Image (tube, rainbow, N blue to C red):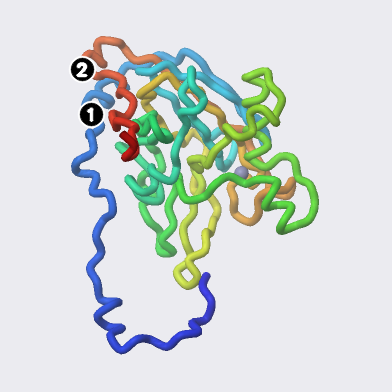
Amino acid sequence: MKYHPQNSEPLDVAERLGKQQVVCYPVDSLPSADMECYQKARENLTLVDETIIPPRQAKTFSVPAGHFFRIVSIEGPQVGDLNLWHKNNLNERFYSGKTRALHGTHVSTSDRLWSSFPYLRPMATVTFDTLDWYGWDEDGGSVHDVIGTRCDPYIHMVLNNYNYHFCCHSNLCRALASYEKKSIDKIEHLIHDVLNVFMCTGFTKDTHQYFMKASPVRPSDFIEFFAEIDLLGALSACPGGDCSSSHSSDAAVCYPLKVEIYKPHQEALIDWSSPEVNSYSGEHGIK
Ligand SMILES: [Zn+2]
């Protein structure tokens, strides 16, 4: 949203507005995901662990590098907020902004989830998405966005002036605090902007505001990832349910989500190696 303009158009308005778009980060030069390798590996998977995330709660889960994990819809339409960290270094965490800059506003098969500075490497690669048929709807909406942040009690207080304790931010805080066996004030800074799994979102065409609409997800739908590095994940079953009307309250009907961890046959990954951390020197112009 912008103010109604207070300044008239300059004389060379046509010249200034008529520029060509240039993609900021052409992804052609990115180290490409070896989808053939992943597709071969996922042909023979063994379920090794699973976690149920109750409504308006979050749970952590671990995924060894070279394993797959799925976030599965069960019981009813439900949106999930996903955080990811390097299992042994929680300072390396999912960077939704750079993932968005590289792959666009919504992710699907073959897109990668990138980690924060100074590590900046693929943490996970999307290897299957049962909602890939959705594409882009007539409002410009799609599923699995990296444009939202996570529902949180702070903006809820600003907008509504009362405490609500089961926003995804708080759910993720409780889950990580329990995993780390630390108080929330020691771990809250590690909670970060999420991948909004199954959430259907976009920007309104007139004001360019973030919108949501009822998720098209149905029980048995899933999005699947390949873990490029050892991962600790946390998933919150958003209090918005399918996010068709509201979030950050107990008003919406909510359902659980399931995380499944799969081990592939190791010979299928013979040509795969875990990506190294970013090779930038770290000097930042200081000798
Ligand atoms: Zn939420």
User: Looking at this rendering, what residue extends furthest in the right direction?
Assistant: 162
Q: Please, what is the three-letter code of the amino acid marked with disc 2?
A: Asp
Q: Position of residue 130 (x, y in %)?
A: 40, 38
Q: Which residue is mark 1?
A: 34
Residue 273, percent from left and from top: 27, 18
Residue placed farthest to the front in the image? 287
**Is 42 situated above or below 17?**
above
- The disc labelled 1 sits on which kind of residue? Asp
Picture quarter with ligand 1:
top right
Residue placed at 23% from the left, 49% from the top?
Answer: 26
Direction from residue 83 to residue 110 in the image, left or right: left
Is residue 287 something one can see in this rendering?
Answer: yes
Judged from the image, the secondary structure of the residue bearing numbered disc 2 is loop
Q: Which mark is residue 271?
A: 2
Q: Residue drawn at (74%, 52%), measured in percent from left and top?
A: 157
Determine whether label 1 and label 2 are within 8 Å by CB.
yes
Q: CA distance from mark 1 to mark 2?
A: 9 Å
